[in-house]
Image (cartoon, helix red, strand yellow):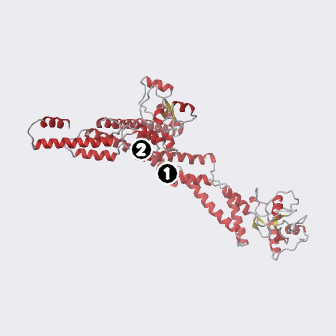
Amino acid sequence: MVRLRLLWASVSELPVTSALCRQVAGAVGQAEAWVERCRRAVVKRSADATLGEALEVIGATIDNAVAQFERQLEVEKKLVAAAEERRGEQAGAVTGDEEADAAQASAPPSPTRAAAAAAGDDSGTLYCLCQRPYEPGANMISCDSCGEWFHMRCVGVSLAQSKSLREYCCPVCAAVAGREGAGLAAALARLRRTKRPSRAALGALLEQARALAAAAEEAALELALVKFDRWATAAARAMEVHEASRRLEGGERMLPLSAGMLLQLLRSAASLEIDAGAVAERILSLLRGNAWREDVEAAFAAGARPEAQVAEALRDRAVALGIRPESDVVGCRLAAALRAFEAWKARADQALAVLTAAASSDEQVRAASAAAAALVREAQALAIAPTGDVDLLKERSTLYCLCQRPYDEQRPLLGCDHCSNWYHYECVGLRSPGESGAGDEPDDFRCPLCCRRAGVAFDFALPPGSDERVARLAEGSKAAGEGEQAGRGKQASHPVHPETAGPGAVPSPRKRQRLGSH
């Protein structure tokens, strides 16, 4: 291009025009027009930089990203070697302690490291969103989440603000946690030195340049794109390996990328002067997936049993992140726990529906009560705590009265003064309390079962068919080895399913009085 311009300068001074002159003039004009188009696509309006200078900036950011990737890759190799040395030939996940030890060499500048960097002993570490080496005298702030150091000017924190901060979360970690707002975007906007064109836009400009007879900066643009593609390909491959390591099938043969590698890739993608937004979003998704897995592990750690709402919220987060828990190396535990809980919950709902339905037959109620008692026992083995469902099952699985129905707060119960059994007023021939609270309530109520055991007549007229119920219940009590337990102060229990009794399972005398006043 330079030679073409010199040729045109010498030819244009001649008084004679020719086809060659016109051809040279056209080639120079087309090349200059391409340079201007390229400059408008790359150089910021507020800058007076040339296209060549802008391409140098773009190339430098790519060189930094490649260098940091290769540097972090060495750290990853140390992590793998440490894991293999510790576990022999067995594959396993890298622990947090191993990662911390391996990452210590690349820790942000502490006073000791700052002195080493000032002495020229820095190992090429780049810091902050700007991805520049340590600068003596620059005010920096450390993120309490990732440990990375940032120039205060780059993240918009003043010296006065830094003194009042108890904790600082950098824009990158805020974005990972979903608390970004405009923090990361605003910080990156302040640091932009070019228009940050897309790879596609620069590729189109390069194709235009190749169609010209000559174009200035074509070689620089092509070199920048080659280096960018090299970095993007390496980053994509690393992310593919990480994603594969998180899959339940085949993931045990691979180690995931460390948090340090993912964060470095994200900072590099954010600092590039060629738009790498798609790469950054993918890395953000991987980091959020890691955070989700940590929350899943914490929810089930040390025998803990999360409540259903917590487990379901974790599943919803996985869906939003595009993770299939059942296929995830960590999420499979959550998926299995939810499957078991939901199957248990479906059976519990079915039993409760029968127990609360007025149309259920005696046989159906007895079967549902036994099923509910079994479900209460099974609940102890669930990885997810059913909480309120168990309390409801305990209450509904306990059957009362001659009718052997679960507790219904709409039907007042009267307690026997000689045993633990409770009876509906109408089922033992008594008048149920009305709105005024008046009703039949003997001073010393002996239930039909106690009368049968004592060999005395029941004082009240039982409804038709009650004798058979009394006989069946008496036989059941006898088979269970239950004798008469006299006295008002004895602990309540159920004659058929004592294991289901618990706090609130059997109405207390105080509840009896309250219900009797309704």
Question: Quarter holding the N terminus?
Answer: top left
Disc 1 secondary structure class: helix
Type of amino acid at the residue the image marks with label 1: Leu
Measured as percent of width and height from the top left, residue 26 is found at 17, 43
The part of the image, by quadrant, that contains residue 21 is top left
User: What is the CA distance from the residue labelled 2 to the residue labelled 1?
Assistant: 19 Å
Measured along the vertical axis of the image, is residue 84 above or below residue 473?
above
The part of the image, by quadrant, that contains residue 347 is bottom right
Front-most of 428 and 275?
A: 275
Measured along the vertical axis of the image, is residue 348 above or below residue 315?
below
As drawn, is 375 to the left or to the right of 327?
right
Question: Quarter holding the C terminus?
Answer: bottom right
Measured as percent of width and height from the top left, residue 297 is found at 57, 47
Name the residue rendered at 78%, 60% in the picture. Answer: 506
Name the residue rendered at 56%, 48% in the picture. Answer: 296
Type of amino acid at the residue the image marks with label 2: Ala
- Chain-order first, disc 2 or disc 1: 2
Q: Residues within 10 Å of mark 1 (few under 14, many from 20)?
A: some
Measured as percent of width and height from the top left, residue 493 is found at 80, 60
Measured along the vertical axis of the image, is residue 198 above or below residue 191?
below
As drawn, is 512 to the left or to the right of 208?
right
How many numbered marks appear?
2
Q: Which mark is residue 321?
A: 1
Front-most of 383 and 249?
A: 383
As drawn, is 462 to the left or to the right of 42?
right
Measured as percent of width and height from the top left, residue 455 is found at 90, 69
Front-most of 497 and 305?
A: 305
Q: Which mark is residue 238?
A: 2
Measured along the vertical axis of the image, is residue 142 above or below residue 269?
above
